[in-house]
Structure formats: structure tokens, C-alpha cells
């Protein structure tokens, strides 16, 4: 599948990996890898979580030149110069990836709850999707097509932070959606790629924009990776927020 990137360039997405639920299908979550990675590595991690009612969809980003690497091409959900809430935003690239993710979720059964999670750049893309969902449309004005029930961002940052509050305050509907959307953010205090302060400030921007249903957790000594403790927290949070504990299947 392809999408139009900056200046109309068509970008081909890589392979999508799917982890089927072991029990009754109650939720589907798209999980987005970090820069230079692919969907396969995360599908193996997620498949081992004690979440038998969750279907995981792990797509692979297009390969594109990345400004932060001097234009060197690698898998990336959008172009990025710096992994910071203050950096310039590739809005067109963010919108294209958010639309691709929404399309992956649009064919799921109507009684299944939908979520988006990710690591690093994947977390940034998940948070952009959250903003599009609350606002009701992508940055380019096209309507956002699905309803989200959970957002997870690990070791990431909030893109388009400067315009978020204006978008959410644009309507009562946007404000209500933002306030009701559960978000979990996790960040290592020792992160050398996306600094802990950027994770902390992302949470502050989100809360100040109306995303009040937000849980931010710091992990002492953690660098730019995940650990079993953090993934245990993800599992517990998802079970509670999506009502998975109520299922016996």
C-alpha cells in the first residue's frame, strides 16, 4: 500500500505483521515501530504479552530520506530533523501515516475497540493520530474515519505541539473526545535519543490541551528502549482501560 508524501512523492509501506488474539477478540491495536526498525520485531514482543483478547497489527513504515540522518534513507513514519516537541513538523508525512493507520483499523469488527501505540517515532505518530481523532479531521482537513479507545506512547514526543490546543478548543466535540481518550505515556529518565524532558513536556502539552485522561510514568535508569516492567505496565493499563479483565474468553 502506498501514500503520497511531501511534494506528492508516493511512498510504499513495508510488510505488515499481525498477531491474532488467542481468546475472544475484544480489541485491535496498531503498534508503530521506531525509526529504522520494522513491524516484525515488535510483533514478537507484543505476541508474548498476557493479552489474549487483543489483535496486534504491526505495520512497517516506508523507506524515506530522514533529515536527522543527513538525508540517509531508512524506515520512518515521517521526516524528522530533531526528536523534540520544539522541532519542525513534517505535517504531510504525519497525516499520510495517520491515514494509513486509520485505514488498517477501519475494517475491524464494529464491536471491537480500537487503539494505537508506538515506540519513539511510532509514539509520536500515535499521538498525532490522537490529535486527529479528537479534532475530527487530519491536518489537511480530511475527516478522521474511526473511533479510538486507547493511545500508548513509549519513549516518544508530541509533534505539532504548538497548534494542538487551538485544534482541541475549536469545538465542544473535540474537547469531549480529548478528555475521554485514555493515553498512557512511558519514558526512561536516561533516554539519550528522545530526552526525558521532551517526554515530560509532551504530557504537559497534552494535559493543557484537554487530554486529561492521561497517565505518564517515568522509569529510572531506562534509556531509549523498553523493559519488561514497562511492558507489564502496558498490559495492566490496557486490561483496565479496555475492560479486558471482564472477559473469560
Image (spheres, rainbow, N blue to C red):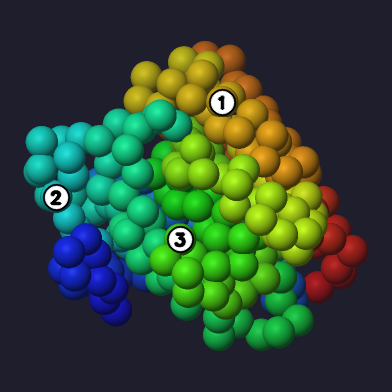
Q: Nearer the viewer, mark 1 or mark 3?
A: 3
Percent across and percent down for residue 61 are 30, 60
Give residue 201's mark.
1
- The relative height of residue 99 versus residue 93 in the rendered view (above or below) is below
Image check: 88 left or right of 187?
left
Find numbered disc 3 in the image and state the secondary structure of the residue it sits on.
Answer: loop
Mark 2, other Cα within 10 Å: few <14 / some 14–19 / many ≥20: some
Find numbered disc 2 in the image and state the secondary structure of the residue it sits on.
Answer: strand
- Which quadrant of the rendered structure holds the C terminus? bottom right
CA distance for labels 2 and 3: 22 Å
Image check: 222 left or right of 12?
right
Viewer-proximal residue among 40 and 63: 63
Report the residue that reaches farthest toward the right. 246
CA distance for labels 1 and 2: 27 Å
The total number of labels drawn is: 3
Q: Mark 1 near mark 2, Cβ–Cβ under 8 Å? A: no
Pick whichever of labels 2 and 3 is earlier in the sequence: 2
Image check: 112 left or right of 30?
right
Q: Which residue is mark 2?
A: 65
Q: Nearer the viewer, mark 2 or mark 3?
A: 3
Q: Which residue is mark 3?
A: 139
Pick whichever of labels 1 and 2 is earlier in the sequence: 2
Find numbered disc 1 in the image and state the secondary structure of the residue it sits on.
Answer: helix
Q: Can the viewer see residue 97? A: no
Viewer-proximal residue among 227 and 126: 126
Percent across and percent down for residue 156 are 47, 37
Residue drawn at (56%, 26%), measured in percent from left and top? 201
Percent across and percent down for residue 90 are 31, 49
Tell me which corner region of the image, top left, top right, bottom left or bottom right, holds residue 236.
top right
Amino acid at each position: 500500500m502506498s501514500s503520497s508524501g511531501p511534494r506528492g512523492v508516493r511512498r510504499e509501506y513495508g510488510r505488515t505483521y499481525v498477531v491474532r488474539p488467542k481468546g475472544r477478540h475484544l480489541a485491535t491495536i496498531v503498534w508503530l515501530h521506531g525509526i529504522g526498525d520494522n513491524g516484525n520485531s515488535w510483533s514478537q514482543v507484543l505476541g508474548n504479552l498476557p493479552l489474549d483478547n487483543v489483535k496486534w497489527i504491526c505495520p512497517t513504515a516506508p523507506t524515506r530520506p530522514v533529515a536527522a540522518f543527513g538525508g540517509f534513507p531508512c524506515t520512518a513514519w515521517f521526516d524528522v530533523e530533531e526528536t523534540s516537541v520544539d522541532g519542525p513538523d513534517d505535517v504531510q508525512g504525519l497525516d499520510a501515516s495517520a491515514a494509513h493507520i486509520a485505514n488498517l483499523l477501519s475494517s475491524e469488527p464494529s464491536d471491537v475497540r480500537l487503539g494505537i501505540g508506538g515506540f519513539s517515532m511510532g509514539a509520536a505518530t500515535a499521538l498525532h493520530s490522537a490529535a486527529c481523532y479528537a479534532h475530527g479531521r487530519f491536518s489537511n482537513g480530511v475527516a478522521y474515519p474511526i473511533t479510538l479507545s486507547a493511545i500508548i506512547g513509549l519513549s516518544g514526543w508530541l509533534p505539532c505541539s504548538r497548534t494542538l490546543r487551538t485544534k482541541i478548543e475549536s469545538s465542544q466535540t473535540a474537547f469531549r473526545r480529548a478528555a475521554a481518550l485514555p493515553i498512557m505515556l512511558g519514558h526512561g529518565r536516561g533516554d539519550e535519543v528522545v530526552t526525558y524532558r521532551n517526554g515530560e513536556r509532551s504530557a504537559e502539552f497534552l494535559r493543557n490541551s484537554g487530554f486529561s485522561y492521561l497517565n505518564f510514568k517515568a522509569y529510572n535508569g531506562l534509556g531509549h528502549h523498553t523493559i519488561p516492567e514497562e511492558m507489564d505496565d502496558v498490559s495492566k493499563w490496557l486490561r483496565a482501560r479496555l475492560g479486558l479483565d471482564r472477559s473469560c474468553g
